[in-house]
Image: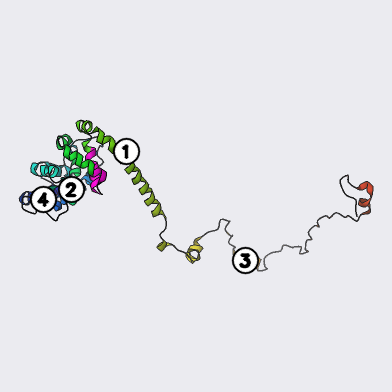
Amino acid sequence: MDSAPAQEVTELLKQWEEQHQTPNYDPIPTLTRIAEIIEAETENFMKKDPDPFDERHPSRTDPECALGHALKVMFKKDNFMTKLVNDYVRDTYYSRQNITGRDVHKLNVAACRLTLDLMPGLEMSVVFQENEALIHRLVNWASNSPEPLQCYATGLLAAAMEVQDIATNFRDLNAMLVPLMLRRLHSLRNKQQEDKQQTQVTPPNQTRHFARFDKKRNNDIKSNGPAPEKKGKRDREKDEGGGSDMLVDETPVKDPETPVKNYNSTVASSPEHWGMMSPPPR
């Protein structure tokens, strides 16, 4: 029995088959919902920590996973997959259908997103073989299109370049894209570092200008010196004047005077006692 996600995908594809040929049909909601289901099940599948080097279909690595069931349902619908790869990724789809007033960019975003989500079960050589127009379109989107279409096109283009024949035929375009992608990676890394530094700074609306006057905070601060010893009952009695027989000499002790040289001494003033470098007394 199919899982709940696979059943929902089946219902969506059934609705698509019934409605996609009607005039002014909008496929974006169906594409978006299927993409959300596939992405959620992909995340659940990755939580099981699968072997990253195992490139088999998810249904073969884990026959019970909902992702494998949903992908099987998708690939049984050849009409939908052909429409997705050949028509919905065209930037002239609405104009060819004589439909006006709709943004084809949103359709391309939804189609590329779903196609990228279906990559684990797609055969790249079949999707991109003898489809040079699609490759050139992806190159254009990966280079100049706004986000998120730029990222989706970059992912699809990377998957296409894994096919040896495609990488050979589009060697020049691939060489042109490599430095572009490296610069983009550097800019994304710098942006991430800037965002990280900004999050570490306390916002102005959260700054406590008078935190030093917080009584609770000051009472919790402990000094680094030794803690004062607690006095017992007997010690307190001694401090109050009782319980001690020790005699203490209260005579003040005079500090020894600092010796001062006496220049008025007759012995020191005689010439024979002058130092060799000392001036004569005046």
Look at the picture and state if 178 lies above or below 281. Answer: above
Q: Estimate the spatial distance between the alpha carbons at disc 2 and disc 1, rounded to whole Å.
A: 25 Å
CA neighbours of label 1 inside 10 A, class few (<14), some (14 to 19), many (20+): few
Q: Amino acid at mark 2?
A: Asn
23 and 98: which is toward the camera:
98
Closest to the camera, between mark 4 and mark 1, is 1
CA neighbours of label 3 inside 10 A, class few (<14), some (14 to 19), many (20+): few
**Label ID, residue 12:** 4
Name the residue located 55 percent from the left edge and 58 percent from the top edge.
Answer: 223
Left or right: where 166 falls relative to 22: right
CA neighbours of label 2 inside 10 A, class few (<14), some (14 to 19), many (20+): many
Left or right: where 270 falls relative to 202: right
Position of the C terminus, as image quadrant, is bottom right
Give the labeled residue for mark 2: 108
CB within 8 Å, label 1 to label 3? no
Q: Earlier in the sequence, mark 1 or mark 3?
A: 1
Q: Earlier in the sequence, mark 4 or mark 1?
A: 4
Main secondary structure type of the part rendered in magenta: helix
Give the labeled residue for mark 3: 236
149 and 236: which is toward the camera:
149
Element under disc 1: helix
| Residue 221 picture location, percent across and down | 51, 60
Q: Estimate the spatial distance between the alpha carbons at disc 2 and disc 3, rounded to whole Å.
A: 88 Å
| Residue 9 picture location, percent across and down | 12, 48
Give the labeled residue for mark 1: 179
Element under disc 3: helix
Q: Amino acid at mark 3?
A: Arg
Q: Earlier in the sequence, mark 3 or mark 4?
A: 4
| Residue 108 picture location, percent across and down | 18, 48
Q: Amino acid at mark 1?
A: Pro
